[in-house]
Image: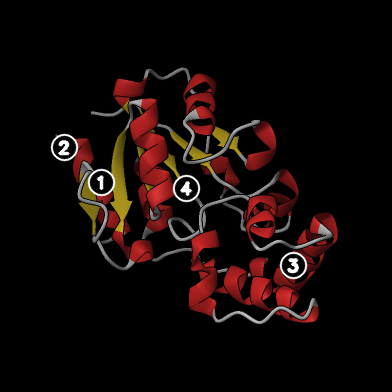
Amino acid sequence: MYQAFLFDLDGTIIDSELIGLHALQETLAELGLTYHLDELRFSLGIPSYKTMEMLNVKDIPAAIKRCAEIEKPYMSNVPIFEGMKDVIAKLPACGIVTSKTAEEMKDSFYLLGIDHYFQSVVCASDTSRHKPDPEPLELGLRLMDCPADKAIYIGDSPYDMKCAMAAGVDFGLALWGAKSASGFEEARYIFETPLDILKLLHR
């Protein structure tokens, strides 16, 4: 059985992806840039400053700040995926490895009252390199004092899977967030619901 269960946050634990995409779309519209939501889906799973760089936004700090302002009223009440609380309460040790910054976590994750379930939290502010680079996950493993072969990382994006593979950690796809298993053929597990994760406790 795994010693540590590490999770992505957006689209894996909390149902926040549309909130983030709409906030990004609105921020860009204020800058005179028009994008459909589907055109912005590439941003799911990477840090906000990287997204702004890829969109050629000139004043990145101001754009990130504005995006967070738009998100904040919604993120404080963002839904937690059904069954997730029950799952993380039963697992031996849990951690978070997310592309959100510490500031973004303060305005979302830490308002939800679930942070006590997690022994470690790694966000984009904690490392110089980010998913799909293995550095964030490797830091999470160190904080949890867990070797790579005794851990699993659960996420919903290709960045999550590539990060896990680069770190030598088994990857489980959160299908409820990813919506499709296409492109995730190298995932060790495909979980249709959060409760499916508990089956690993009996292996």
Label 1: state its secondary structure: helix
Query: Which quadrant does the N terminus fall into?
Result: top left
Residue that carries the numbered disc 4 in the rendered image: 8
Name the mark on residue 67: 3
**Label 3 vs label 4: CA separation?**
20 Å
Label pair 1/4, CB-CB below 8 angstroms: no
Badge 2 crowding class, 10 Å Cα cut-off, few under 14, some 14 to 19, many 20 or more, is few
- Residue type beneath disc 1: Leu
Badge 1 crowding class, 10 Å Cα cut-off, few under 14, some 14 to 19, many 20 or more, is some
At a point 69% along the width and 59% down the height, the residue shown is 52
Name the mark on residue 202: 2
Residue that carries the numbered disc 1 in the rendered image: 198
| Nearer the observer, 39 or 131 | 39
Whichever of labels 2 and 3 marks the residue nearer the N terminus, that label is 3
Residue 88 appears in view: no
Label 3: state its secondary structure: helix
**Label 2 vs label 4: CA separation?**
23 Å
